[in-house]
Amino acid sequence: MCGIVGYIGDQPAADIILDALKRLEYRGYDSSGIATLEGKKIHLTRAVGKLAQLDTALKNTPQAGNIGIGHTRWATHGGVTEANAHPHLAADEVAIVHNGIIENYAELKAELLAKGHEFSSQTDSEVLAHLFLDIVRQGYKGAQAMQQVLARIKGAFALAVLLRDSPDTLFVARNASPLAIGIEDGLVCVASDAMAMAHLTRNVIYLKDGDYAALSLDELQIFDRDNQLANREIIRTSASPALIDKGGYRHFMEKEIHEQPDAIAHTIAAMTDAKGVLKTGLSDADLGDIRHLVILAAGTSHYAGQVGRYWLEGLAGIPVSVETASEYRYRAPAHLAGGAVVAISQSGESLDTLMALRHAKEMGLKTIAIVNVPESSIAREADIILPTRAGPEIGVASTKAFTAQLTVLFALAVDFGRAKARLSADEAAGLQQKLLSVPSAVGAAIDCFEAIRPIAQSLKKTPSCLFLGRGRLYPLALEAALKLKELSYIHAEGFAAGEMKHGPIALIEEDLPVICLLDGDDLSAKTISNLKEAEARGATIILIATASSAKLVDFDSFRVVIEDCDPLLAPLILAIPAQILAYQTAVEKGTDVDQPRNLAKSVTVE
Ligand code: G6P
């Protein structure tokens, strides 16, 4: 998704900003740009495509100035063109970079057009640049101009602005989209993700919603939404300063698939108390008081939540609903007393999930967050944080964060089960032992890369395929289908195997690949019957199965077999071949594995 960087210091700003933008590259973008201010002259360079294009353009025409702003854009308003890339200029007096969406931009644009402003892009962000220009020309300066602009705009945004007539100052603002300020001797920087500037400074201020600021080397002035000077705490960020590399793997995704045994083990270790008992961060009082849970999440995190529901209801008898975050706050959700929400998010910044969390909070629900980024907005706003310890996940398609989320959800189910007296201490300890065996089972499952290659070679030719699962493997079928479509652009749908006969079976035709997840549980025989019905209609059957359940099938064309495991924990282990299938198919097709087209790592717009 879009990334913002800003810098003031004694170094050439364009070099520093380009380096910082590279650290945000993994989030997904389609164009980029940098504006610097040299005295009273604004310089601008923009490029479509990867940062390498911007780098080349800057080498061809170096850009002077020790203050500047930069941006990686993920198109929302207007196509992927240089004119739509940020920064946007207005009359060489204002340069702006913007994340988010200005909801009333059409109205503002009409007003500015009537005043004679001319636009060269289709973006809402250029409207902001002209709104600034209009206000500056009314005589407002610096932070006052920002205050006037903020009073006119609606939506979620993070902004960084250069004003020609304030050559030493960077102006920033945020509402719902993240923005952090970094401070060090001789430099001030800003970024939409602290990771982009952690190599410059570890001293970070997170702006609050409605805040705006005027930043120079001499002074940091931060104002709250009531235009009062605000004191915001400086924290030491835990974001990694190192440029994360692929560690010898071809892709970050391949590396992250291999990191899963560690990610799961670290997540378990962080939830193990001094007596060696599996305990999440919920107190006994919370575990006792909470009577039902609403899980809020998007994408892969949503499917983790759906798997979690099976564990929470099955082990703890606690009712759970799993909500699509983008829908939740718009449909007047009703809750019984004693409810809590669990927001699940790798990035902790998905705007849909953040807004849903806030809505739940306003309705008086206790809020719990399962997040991978401890300083993220969702982590900071939730009452209770249950961290996943997957480490930075760079590949856009989530892998290790997903299995780490499942790990926390399983532990949460055990915790609730014990607190609600659905599980004895011995039963809980037994489940803990089973969870402890997952990292090595996941490690063994990772060995299937080569076994999957022929399947991927066959799958890459298909325009469409289906994934089937029952019980806990139904949401995993949804996740496996999502992974394949994200990475290889093959149309894929997941279905509950028992639901096929109620409609989706009409899709089956000669050679349609049907990929079935099997774990040998009580439902396996029923799943196999459903699969047989697909095979009878000409489908090509591909099995992703545990050793003993695979023995029950003799009509498949391809199979990936993993060691037997407890079916209760099978989603954590069968997730691995599902990820590898999507990965290998993408490699065979030659798609951009780490940054698939149109996708962003963290989606900070609605
Ligand atoms: C984006 C990513 C998905 C991810 C989803 C939720 O759409 O492309 O891979 O699952 O956001 O992200 P979150 O950070 O909230 O888990």
Image (tube, helix red, strand yellow):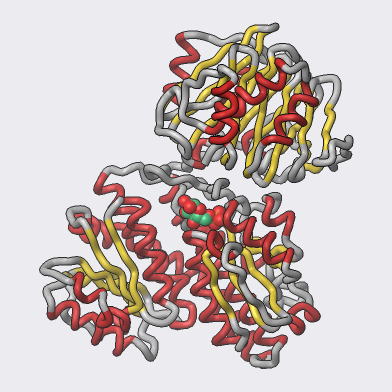
Residue shown at 70%/30% (left/top)? 149
Whether residue 454 is situated above or below residue 89 in the rendered picture: below
Residue at x 71% of width, y 63% of height: 385
Relative to residue 199, is residue 325 drawn left or right? left
Quarter holding residue 471: bottom left
**Can you say whether 123 is above or below 459 in the image?**
above
Taking the view exactly as shown, the residue that stands out farthest to the front is 114
| Residue 261 visible, this angle | no
Q: Residue at x 55, y 26 (%)?
A: 126
Give the percent coordinates (x, y) of residue 270. Answer: 68, 65
So how many labels did they put on this image?
0
In terms of depth relative to the viewer, which is nearer, 310 or 296? 296
Q: Position of residue 601 (x, y in %)?
A: 50, 47
Residue 440 appearing in the image: yes
Q: Would you say 13 lies left or right of 322 here?
A: right
Expressed as whole percent of the image width and height from the top left, the position of residue 18 reads 56, 24
Give 488 or 175, whichever is nearer the viewer: 175
Task: Give the x, y percent position of residue 46.
Answer: 48, 20
Which image quadrant is residue 289 in? bottom right
Figure check: 96 above or below 490: above
As rendered, which of 273 and 52 lies closer to the eye?
52
Residue displayed at 70% across by 50% down: 375
